[in-house]
Image (cartoon, rainbow, N blue to C red):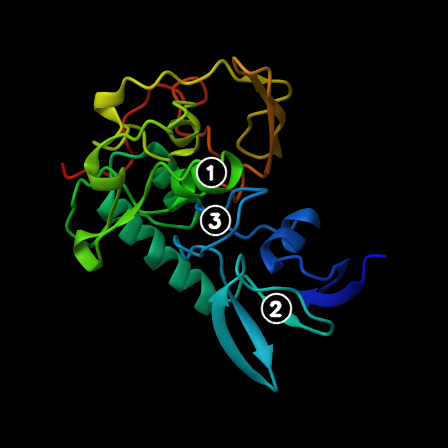
C-alpha cells in the first residue's frame, strides 16, 4: 500500500505519495514551477536549475531544486517568492547566453521574465540538460552516449567519439533535445526521428498543453510509450522547440 504525505506549496495543502518529487507534486496540482531538464519517467539531475524553490526548515529558507527534492510530511515549499523569481530569471538569462539558438530556451526565458540578456553570447549547441543521456541509458538501456570531460570541457558524446554498434538509432536523443539545431555530435549520424504519433496535443499560450501518449513501433515489434504531461505556462516540453509546434518567427534574444 502506498504511503501518502501532506505538504504545503505556496500555501496550498497537497497530498501526494511518498517518494514523489516536489516538482511532480506541484505539477500534479497545477502549481507552475518552470523547468527544462525534467522528463516524466526519467530520473532527475537538476541540471537546468530553473525549478529552484525555497524550502522552509525551522523558520529558515533553503534554496534547492524541486525535481531532486522528495516530498516529506509537513514540508513547506515556496516557489514564487521574489527571491526565487530573481534567481530563476538570472538562470534563464544564463541559459539564453549559453545557447541563444534554442527556441525552447528562449521561450522558457520569456516565461521566467527575462527581457534582456546581460551576458555575452556563447552560441553553444548544448546546454548539458542530460535529457538525451538519460533516455538512452534508462529507457533504452543502451548507454550509447554520455557526459565527457569536466568543467568548461564537459560535453555529450559517444564513447571515444565514435558511435558504438549498440546505438539503436532510435532518435530519442534528438526528440528530447531542447536545441533547435541538433548538437554537433548528432549531425553526422543522419539520425531519422521515428514516426511518433501525437495522440493528443493542445498548444496554447494560456491553457494546459498535453501530449498524452506517444508511440513508435520498431523492427522487433517492441512498443515504446512515453507520456509527456506538461503545462505550457511553465514547462518547456520536448516538442516546443520543434518546427511543427512553433511558428516561423525570429528569436526574441539575439546578438543583434
Nearer the observer, 108 or 165:
165
- Asked if the residues shown at circle 2 and circle 3 are in contact, with their CB atoms under 8 angstroms apart, the answer is no
Residue drawn at the location 70% of the way across and 67% of the way down: 8
In this view of the protein, which residue sits in the foreground, 32 or 38? 38
Query: Does residue 69 appear left or right of residue 135 in this picture?
Result: right
Q: CA distance from mark 1 to mark 2?
A: 29 Å
Left or right of 152 on screen, residue 67: right
- Residue 145: give x, y in percent of width and height: 33, 39
Residue 11 shows up from this direction: no
Which residue, given by chain and number where applicable, does mark 1 sit on? 135
In terms of depth relative to the viewer, which is nearer, 248 or 192? 192
Q: Earlier in the sequence, mark 3 or mark 1?
A: 3
In this rendering, is residue 237 above or below 111? Answer: above
For the point 52% across and 37% down, the residue is 139
Q: Which mark is residue 125?
A: none
Query: Which quadrant would residue 241 be assigned to in this image?
Result: top left
Cα separation, mark 2 vs mark 3, equals 16 Å
User: Mark 1, residues whose alpha carbon is within 10 Å: few (<14), some, or many (≥20)?
Assistant: many
Q: How many marks?
A: 3
Q: Which residue is mark 3?
A: 35
Q: Position of residue 122 (x, y in %)?
A: 16, 45
In the displayed orientation, state which residue is furthest to the bottom.
Answer: 58
Q: Quadrant of the N terminus?
A: bottom right
Q: Earlier in the sequence, mark 2 or mark 3?
A: 3
Q: Which residue is mark 2?
A: 77
Amino acid at each position: 500500500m502506498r504511503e501518502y504525505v501532506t505538504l504545503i506549496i505556496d500555501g496550498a495543502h497537497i497530498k501526494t505519495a511518498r517518494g514523489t518529487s516536489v516538482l511532480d507534486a506541484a505539477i500534479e496540482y497545477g502549481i507552475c514551477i518552470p523547468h527544462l531538464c525534467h522528463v516524466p519517467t526519467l530520473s532527475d539531475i537538476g541540471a537546468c536549475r530553473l525549478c529552484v524553490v525555497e524550502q522552509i526548515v525551522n523558520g529558515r529558507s533553503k534554496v534547492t531544486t524541486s525535481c531532486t527534492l522528495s516530498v516529506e510530511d509537513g514540508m513547506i515549499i515556496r516557489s514564487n517568492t521574489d527571491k526565487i523569481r530573481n534567481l530563476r530569471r538570472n538562470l534563464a538569462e544564463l541559459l539564453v547566453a549559453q545557447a541563444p539558438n534554442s527556441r525552447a530556451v528562449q521561450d522558457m526565458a520569456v516565461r521566467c521574465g527575462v527581457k534582456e540578456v546581460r551576458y555575452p553570447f556563447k552560441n553553444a549547441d548544448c546546454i548539458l540538460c542530460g535529457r538525451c543521456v538519460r533516455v538512452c541509458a534508462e529507457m533504452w538501456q543502451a548507454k550509447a552516449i554520455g557526459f565527457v570531460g569536466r568543467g568548461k570541457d564537459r560535453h555529450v558524446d559517444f564513447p571515444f567519439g565514435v558511435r558504438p554498434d549498440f546505438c539503436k538509432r532510435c532518435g530519442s536523443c534528438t526528440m528530447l533535445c531542447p536545441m533547435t539545431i541538433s548538437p554537433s555530435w548528432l549531425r553526422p549520424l543522419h539520425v531519422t526521428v521515428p514516426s511518433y504519433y501525437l495522440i493528443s496535443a493542445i498548444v496554447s499560450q494560456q491553457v494546459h498543453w498535453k501530449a498524452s501518449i506517444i508511440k513508435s513501433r520498431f523492427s522487433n515489434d517492441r512498443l515504446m510509450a512515453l507520456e509527456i504531461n506538461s503545462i505550457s505556462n511553465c514547462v518547456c516540453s520536448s516538442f516546443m522547440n520543434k518546427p511543427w509546434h512553433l511558428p516561423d518567427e525570429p528569436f526574441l534574444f539575439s546578438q543583434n
